[in-house]
Amino acid sequence: MRLLGLDPGLRRTGWGVIDALGDRLRYVGDGAIHSDSNLDTAGRLMQLFTGIAAVIREHRPDGAAVEETFLNKNPATTLKLGLARAVALLVPAQAGLRVAEYSAKTVKKSLVGTGGADKTQVQMMVRALLPGVDLHSADSADALAVAICHAHHGATERLWAAGRAS
């Protein structure tokens, strides 16, 4: 199963694609979609929309996962992040993908074992779980972490479903 992870942001939205083959994970690609800060908000959201759609067309994922928004001290920043997150939810849904959402704490706990892990620890685990990965940015590393979290949760759901069926 090919999975797309998204780490939304108005300036940069990180993306990462992995293949989950049973209990094995394989790195496919990662990057970040940048918006032009000289544009108005609608123009920047359109750039994110177009960029995410291009990633989906190129990599053809079977499912997607998006990191949930956390609250910032600045309400305007939180609102802008929420707008970018809405685009990150909408584009895969429009492409017919099921979209899961995970909190940053859940993603960190899934990879590192603790919800309080820092970015360095998360990046180290992404590298360990995806041999050969060449992380393009902190945003794409976070997106790959979201995809890995989704793969782990999907495997758990399949195990529970198999247990209920027997």
Image (cartoon, rainbow, N blue to C red):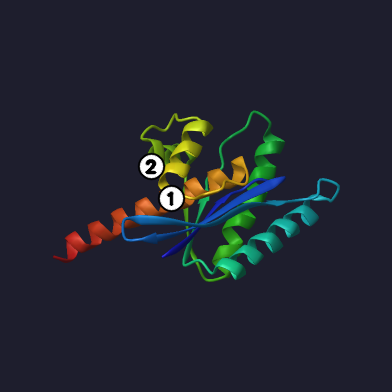
Which quadrant: the N terminus?
bottom left
Quadrant hosting residue 94: bottom right
Q: Residues within 10 Å of mark 2 (few under 14, many from 20)?
A: many
Q: Are marks 2 and 1 in contact (CB under 8 Å)?
A: yes
Residue 67: x and y, percent?
Answer: 52, 47
154 or 119: which is nearer to us?
Answer: 119
Q: Residue furthest right?
A: 38
Name the foreground residue: 89 vs 134: 134
For disc 2, the marked residue is 110
Disc 2/disc 1 C-alpha distance (Å): 8 Å
Q: Residues within 10 Å of mark 1 (few under 14, many from 20)?
A: many
Farthest-out residue, front: 132
Measured as percent of width and height from the top left, residue 162 is found at 21, 63
Q: Furthest-left residue in view?
A: 166
Q: Residue at x 31, y 60 (%)?
A: 22
Instruction: Please give the label number shown on residue 64.
Output: none
**Quadrant holding the C terminus:** bottom left
Q: Residue 9 placed where, x, y %?
A: 65, 45
Up the image or down, 63 lies above or below 74; here it is below
| Dot placed on the residue nearer the N-terminal end, 2 or 1 | 2
Q: What amino acid is at disc 2? A: Ser
The residue located at (55%, 44%) in the rendering is 141
Is disc 2 placed on a helix, strand or loop? helix
**Residue that carries the numbered disc 1 in the rendered image:** 148
Q: Residue at x 63, y 46 (%)?
A: 82
Q: Is residue 41 above or below residue 164?
A: above
Compared to residue 115, the image places residue 14 above or below, namely: below
Q: Residue 73: x and y, percent?
A: 64, 28
Q: Secondary structure at mark 1?
A: helix
Q: Along the horizontal axis of the image, is 28 left or right of 81?
A: left
